[in-house]
């Protein structure tokens, strides 16, 4: 189903000298000439392991899906620049590209869109699942639990056809789950999907329509949703994707692996940052709108504040998705005729930070989350639902990475090692003698 990961030939080696011995380790080059030292034989040859907290220097796999050059601010899915996909493509087309490696032919896309459209319904018992949860439940754990629970409805053995059905079901049901978790939280009836609508329009319909009234989807808003989903669709080996791969490496099923990815995405340093950005902007506004004072706090090591939506493990330049979103943000708000105070504060923060020595020297630029929250707010998405939008977008990337891992000739269970720093061997002390 997924394109197998390419394994370019290994090239000349690197030499490691340790304890008076020299060992040669092969170098590996990717298709964009990124080089790595292949350390698979390191422990066998030397007894050493590597230590790399946060994995900043560790390539965990070969992958043919997404290329990022963080220094230059480049992002490409399957070789196609994000800017072109954002302008010319649709989310379902991008999902197909990520999953199958090529842009779909018209017939492929029609078939895929039709399959996804026909699998959006949730089992009626699922309504009771939502009803069992507190009204103020954060939608991210609701989505994680719901996707995990899907596995209980589809327990067939993992054949190619069943796996394909699982991919379609996940793509189809994720927006329904997201919308139902929102409807439950505000006490409105669940809206069934409408098969006449495209993916983004159907999501808006399930979120904002009510049975008592007609709801016409605004095409400007539907396009904004589709664009946001495209921009979030994959981002190589980030925290949640690595989680999906790691859980999948135990041969856990796709529902379970995606559920774990959703949990990883929830964290404020990852997908939860878009919620943190809007809360930060609201706090600055409530305190009088002094952007400079907040930037000063973000630089102060004694203060815990960070400029949320700034900085990235990989991008040491402007995140290309932030550039697209800033433009889209202004377009959407312009078309809706909304003057947005938070957008003004965000632009002021950006202007100050980009001229500030601290942010320049630390190579901290706006990331995808800096402007996305403002668009989500304009769309009417509740703040705690921002990361759910990220989840719907990231889903095809997670699935593509999970499938790629499964077909990788190097597939093994993920099992890092550690440097143990605890107590050395000591004798058990009976409880009566512990003082
Ligand atoms: N504001 C102020 N200082 C920052 C920020 C920030 N947003 N981000 C990093 N720094 C500083 C750190 O204090 C540290 O400074 P020091 O070296 O002087 O001690 C230095 O930059 C490096 O920061 P780390 O946290 O070590 O960088 P790391 O690569 O581990 O973290 C991260 C990247 C988590 C994204 C970080 O930049 C951050 O917390 N940003 C804010 C949260 C955010 O926007 N997350 C969304 C990321 S994009 C995504 O997941 C979709």
Image (cartoon, rainbow, N blue to C red):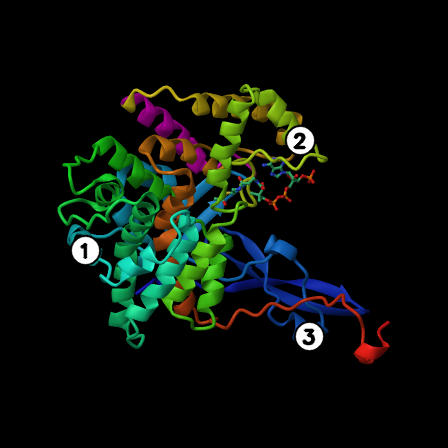
Q: Residues within 10 Å of mark 1 (few under 14, many from 20)?
A: few
The answer to whether residue 401 is seen in the rendering is: no
Residue found 37% across the figure and 33% down from its top: 377
Q: Secondary structure at mark 1?
A: helix
Residue found 50% across the figure and 62% down from its top: 61
The location of residue 356, given as percent across then percent down, is 63, 24
Q: Which residue is mark 3?
A: 45
Relative to 406, is 209 on the left or the right? left
Chief SS of the magenta region: helix
Q: CA distance from mark 1 to mark 3?
A: 49 Å
Relative to 389, is 57 on the left or the right? right
Tell me if residue 174 comes above or below residue 339 in the rendering: below
Residue found 62% across the figure and 22% down from its top: 293
Tell me if residue 197 comes above or below residue 125 in the rendering: above
Is the residue at mark 1 in contact range of ligand 1, meaning its CB lies under 8 Å from it?
no
Q: CA distance from mark 2 to mark 3?
A: 45 Å
Residue found 47% across the figure and 66% down from its top: 247
Q: Earlier in the sequence, mark 2 or mark 1?
A: 1
Mark on residue 299? 2
The location of residue 268, given as percent across then percent down, is 53, 45
Q: Secondary structure at mark 3?
A: helix
Q: What stretch of residues is rendered in magenta? A: 316-335
Location of the C terminus by quadrant is bottom right
Q: Which residue is mark 1?
A: 108
Is the residue at mark 2 in contact range of ligand 1, meaning its CB lies under 8 Å from it?
yes
Ligand 1 quadrant assignment: top right
Q: Earlier in the sequence, mark 2 or mark 3?
A: 3
Badge 1 vs badge 3, beta-carbon distance below 8 Å: no
């Amino acid at each position: 189903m997924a394109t197998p990961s390419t394994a370019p030939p290994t090239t000349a080696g690197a030499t490691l000298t340790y304890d008076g011995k020299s060992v040669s380790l092969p170098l590996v080059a990717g298709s964009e000439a990124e080089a790595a030292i292949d350390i698979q034989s390191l422990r066998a040859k030397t007894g050493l392991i590597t230590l790399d907290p946060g994995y900043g220097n560790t390539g965990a796999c070969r992958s043919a899906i997404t290329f990022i050059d963080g220094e230059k601010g480049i992002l490409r899915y399957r070789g196609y620049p994000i800017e072109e996909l954002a302008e010319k493509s649709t989310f379902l087309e991008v999902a197909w590209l990520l999953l199958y490696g090529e842009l779909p032919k018209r017939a492929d896309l029609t078939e895929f869109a039709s399959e996804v459209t026909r699998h959006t319904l949730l089992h009626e018992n699922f309504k009771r699942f939502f009803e069992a949860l507190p009204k103020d439940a954060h939608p991210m754990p609701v989505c994680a639990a719901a996707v995990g629970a899907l596995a209980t409805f589809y327990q067939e053995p993992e054949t190619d056809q069943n796996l394909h059905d699982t991919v379609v079901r996940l793509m189809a049901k994720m927006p329904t789950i997201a919308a139902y978790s929102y409807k439950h939280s505000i006490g409105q009836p669940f809206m069934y999907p409408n098969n006449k609508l495209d993916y983004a329009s159907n999501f808006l319909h399930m979120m904002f329509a009510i049975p008592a009234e007609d709801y016409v989807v605004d095409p400007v808003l539907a396009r904004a949703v589709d664009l946001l989903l495209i921009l979030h669709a994959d981002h190589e080996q980030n925290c949640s994707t690595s989680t999906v791969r790691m859980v999948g490496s135990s041969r856990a099923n796709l529902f379970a692996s995606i559920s774990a990815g959703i949990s990883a995405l929830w964290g404020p340093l990852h997908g939860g940052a878009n919620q943190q950005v809007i809360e930060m902007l609201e706090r600055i506004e409530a305190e009088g709108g002094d952007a400079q004072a907040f930037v000063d706090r973000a630089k102060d090591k004694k203060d815990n504040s960070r400029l949320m939506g700034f900085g990235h493990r990989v991008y040491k330049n402007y995140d290309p998705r932030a550039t697209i979103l800033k433009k889209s943000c202004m377009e959407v708000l312009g078309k809706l005729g909304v003057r947005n105070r938070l957008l003004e504060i965000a632009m002021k923060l950006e202007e100050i930070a980009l001229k500030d020595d601290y942010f320049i020297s630390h190579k901290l630029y706006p990331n995808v989350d800096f402007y996305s929250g403002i668009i989500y707010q304009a769309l009417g998405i509740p703040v705690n639902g921002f990361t759910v939008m990220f989840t719907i977008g990231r889903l095809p990337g997670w699935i593509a990475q999970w499938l790629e891992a499964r077909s990788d000739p190097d597939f093994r269970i993920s099992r890092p090692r550690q440097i143990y720093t605890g107590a050395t061997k000591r004798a058990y002390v009976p409880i009566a003698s512990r003082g």
